[in-house]
């Protein structure tokens, strides 16, 4: 049971519900921006910093909408729901460093880390989709094209499996073969 109230006395119950539904979408959107895009954590009070922060948030939101639209089954869970931004952030954006270059009319992103074969396939599929879809340039980047490059994937033999390695510390004394 839900209860809605309104100061607009002329609205019917159905109109109040419709009005609230529209407001709810806005509230969910603002909550999403605050929680997932850190809209409330602006890095400064200077108007330029605020503008840059909002611009970056807008780019991130636009990219995630592209992800939702373009990745299809890759972004969907087995039950049909769409993976959260937090999950996709881990997969797509927190994989390590990248070197950015501008070459002619192309913005190049060279990922510096190697990933598992499965993750490399997922990332390559995603970023190739963006490159192909916007082969004539992205409006948000002033018409520049985007190209992504990946290192050769690493096999499981390169995974450290979170094993602890003993730390050896100390100085070797002159003439001594033993470490202290």
Image (spheres, rainbow, N blue to C red):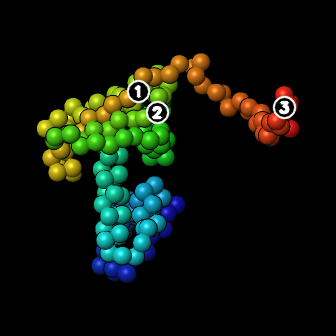
Residue 68 visible in the displayed image = no
Mark 1 vs 2, N-terminal side: 2
Residue position marked by numbered label 2 in the rendering: 113
Q: List the residue tagged with mark 3.
A: 175
Considering depth in this image, is 83 or 118 the residue closer to the camera?
Answer: 118
Image marks 1 and 2: residues in contact by CB distance under 8 Å: yes
* In this rendering, the label closer to the viewer, 3 or 2: 3
Residue 169: in sight, yes or no?
Answer: yes
Q: Position of residue 172 (x, y in %)?
A: 80, 36
Residue 89 % position (x, y): 45, 44
C-alpha distance separating marks 1 and 3: 45 Å
Looking at the image, residue 128 sits to the left or right of residue 6; the answer is: left
3 or 2: tag closer to the N-terminus: 2
Mark 1: give few (<14), some (14-19) or many (20+) Cα within 10 Å.
few
Q: Which residue occupies the extreme front position in the image? A: 175
Q: Label 1, on which residue?
A: 151
């Amino acid at each position: 049971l839900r209860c809605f109230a309104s100061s607009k006395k002329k609205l019917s119950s159905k109109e109040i519900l419709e009005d609230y539904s529209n407001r709810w979408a806005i509230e969910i959107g603002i909550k999403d921006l605050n929680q997932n895009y850190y809209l409330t954590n602006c890095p400064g009070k200077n108007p330029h910093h605020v503008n840059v922060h909002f611009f970056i948030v807008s780019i991130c939101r636009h990219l995630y909408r592209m992800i939702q639209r373009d990745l299809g089954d890759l972004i969907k869970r087995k039950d049909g729901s769409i993976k959260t931004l937090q999950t996709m952030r881990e997969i797509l954006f927190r994989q390590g460093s990248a070197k950015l270059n501008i070459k002619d009319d192309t913005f190049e992103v060279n990922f510096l880390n190697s990933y598992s074969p499965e993750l490399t396939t997922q990332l390559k599929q995603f970023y190739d989709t963006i490159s192909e879809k916007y082969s004539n340039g992205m409006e948000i980047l002033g018409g520049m094209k985007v190209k992504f490059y990946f290192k050769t994937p690493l096999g499981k033999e390169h995974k450290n499996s979170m094993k602890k390695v003993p730390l050896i510390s100390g100085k070797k004394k002159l003439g001594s073969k033993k470490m202290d």
